[in-house]
Amino acid sequence: MAIDYTVEDGIALMSLNRAPANAYDMDMLRELMDAIHRVRSDNAVRLALVRSALPKFFCAGADISTLQDVDRAGFANFLTVAHESVDMIARTPKLFIAAIAGHCIGGGLEIALACDFRFAAAGKYRLGLGEVNLGLSPGMGGTQRLPRLIPKSRALHLMVTGETLAPEEALQAGIVDQVFPEDKFWDEVMTRARKLAAGPTMAQGYIKLSVNFGLEASLAEGLAIERTHQSQLFASEDVAEGLKAFQEKRPAKFAGK
């Protein structure tokens, strides 16, 4: 298996595990989609965390050696599956965190960009979209997600030059949300993951979808999406608990339902 999947405290731990660099092939992409489907369908999972089981690498992108003899139709199919896998992350009504503690290049960064938060460990590794060095463009959503995350000209520069960034530089650019000391990284990530997982995860998921779908639509369409999600949330058990806890002046105990 190229992806190890476990659940801890309501958090799905999706560990990329394809030595030596987590470079993905078609089978690994399908395993990724299967893992995301498990996150979607398991009510006990309140949040997902994507990490690497290997030292030095989060993910080095596509395994080029598996694509060298592929014809144009086969490559197009590979791109379709790659897009579908990261789109599943963006369209799942649960939060995803990318925990990055090693080289995160090309499709590896594109997987992280599809997640809702990116936490990085300090260290001597690089992040970037280097597909241009192969005569290619980012093909797993990078040309669309990176310019939506950071200024367009900065995103364009990184993609057309293939420049890579150290974790602290990625933080300054706005690509990662926080950088933690290497020796405290996992504890810091899990502290934040557990806090989010203990919250109103159904509301978190609908907020995520309202933002993601709304950014693809006009303002009027985005507001309609927001109203729809708010109406669905109002009928939830979490809202009933939240209102009751507010009246009783106590912390709410959310169940994500």
Image (cartoon, rainbow, N blue to C red):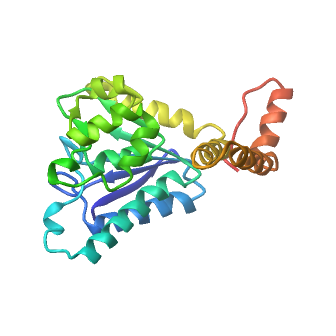
Taking the image as shown, residue 105 lies to the left or right of residue 79, namely: left
Does residue 168 lie above or below 47 as drawn?
Answer: above
Q: Is residue 186 visible?
A: no
Residue 184 in percent (x, y) is at: 32, 25
Front position in the image: 144 or 3: 144
Location of residue 190 with respect to 13 vertically, above or below: above
Residue 171 position in % (x across, y down) = 35, 26
Question: Looking at the image, which is closer to me, 84 or 10?
Answer: 84
Left or right, 59 with respect to 117, comes to: left
Whether residue 34 is visible to the viewer of this picture, yes or no, is: yes
The correct choice, above or below, for 100 with respect to 174 in the image is below
Residue 15: x %, y % from top left: 33, 51
Q: Position of residue 86 (x, y in %)?
A: 42, 56
Indicate the quadrant containing the N terminus: top left, top right, bottom left or bottom right.
bottom left
On the picture, is 82 further left or further right than 11? left
Q: Quadrant of residue 33?
A: bottom left
Which residue is located at x 36 percent, y 32 percent?
A: 153
